[in-house]
Image: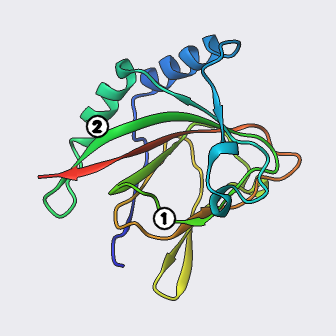
């Protein structure tokens, strides 16, 4: 599974992240939030509910522009779904692969103590490898690689991320 997980630091413009933060904060009291309650049992397991919000086209377009600069095996990534996730203490996801050609996370916490968990783990042949949730790091799963996110600790701050899913095109 060589190169099945791609990582990019300083992935998005900080001004775009700031606009996403402003938008999501304005949505706090609106009824358009979802939770992990509707996920499959294998993925949600016994997690504290993870909260999510679909983001509008105004954010999809600049992120799609950023993805257009990445080529993997001469293919491009086309975003189908862009969501903002809030991971409370004691949240995680079980081992799974995504039902899309690619899945990506962009981490939004400016500071994250590794002791708080929330580490992206994936299977690479017989080994388990990990990616730390560093601010503005993007991790892309391009080969439907089995992965999980470790539980955030009881004293962890809210962990925030963008979750991006889509298809590959030529």
| Residue 105 appears left or right of 32 | left
User: How many numbered dots are placed on residues in this image?
Assistant: 2
Front position among marks 1 and 2: 1
Residue sitting at x 43%, y 35%: 82
Q: Residues within 10 Å of mark 2 (few under 14, many from 20)?
A: some
Nearer-N-terminus badge (1/2): 2
Q: Where residue 25 sits in the image (x, y, percent)?
A: 64, 16
User: Which colour assignment does the render follow?
Assistant: rainbow
How crowded is the residue under tag 1: few (<14 C-alpha within 10 Å), some, or many (20+)?
some
Q: Residue at the location (11% across, 52% down)? A: 170
The numbered disc on residue 40 is none
Circle on res. 97: 1
**Looking at the image, which is closer to me, 39 or 87?**
39
Distance (Cα) linking label 1 and label 2: 24 Å
Quarter placement of the N terminus: bottom left
Q: Nearer the viewer, residue 142 or 21?
A: 142
Asked whether residue 83 appears in the rendered view, the answer is yes
Q: Is residue 111 placed above or below 152 in the rendered structure?
A: above
Q: Is residue 113 above or below residue 5?
A: above
- Indicate the secondary structure of the residue bearing disc 2: helix
Can residue 8 be seen in this snapshot? no
Furthest residue in direction bottom, as rendered: 126
Q: Position of residue 93 (x, y in %)?
A: 66, 57
Side of 137 relative to 64 (left or right): right
Which x, y percent locates residue 46?
A: 79, 57
79 relative position to 159: left or right: left
The residue depicted at 50 percent of the width and 70 percent of the height is 146
Residue 52 percent location from the top left of the image: 61, 34
Mark 1 and 2 residues: CB-CB less than 8 Å, in contact? no
Question: Disc 2 designates what residue?
Answer: 66
Query: Residue drawn at (79%, 39%), measured in percent from left and top?
Result: 157
Under circle 1, the secondary element is loop
């Amino acid at each position: 599974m060589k190169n099945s997980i791609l990582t990019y630091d300083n992935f998005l413009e900080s001004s775009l992240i700031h606009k996403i933060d402003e938008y999501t904060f304005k949505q706090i009291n609106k009824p358009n939030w979802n939770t992990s309650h509707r996920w499959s049992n294998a993925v949600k397991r016994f997690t504290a509910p993870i909260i999510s919000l679909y983001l509008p086209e105004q954010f999809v377009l600049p992120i799609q522009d950023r993805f257009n600069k990445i080529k993997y095996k001469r293919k491009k990534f086309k975003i189908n779904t862009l969501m903002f996730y809030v991971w409370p203490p004691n949240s995680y996801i079980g081992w799974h692969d995504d039902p899309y050609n690619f899945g990506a996370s962009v981490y939004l916490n400016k500071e994250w103590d590794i002791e708080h968990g929330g580490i992206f783990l994936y299977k690479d042949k017989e080994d388990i490898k990990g990616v730390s949730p560093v601010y503005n790091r993007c991790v892309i799963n391009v080969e439907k690689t089995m992965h999980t996110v470790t539980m955030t600790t009881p004293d962890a701050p809210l962990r925030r991320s963008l979750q991006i899913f889509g298809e590959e095109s030529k």
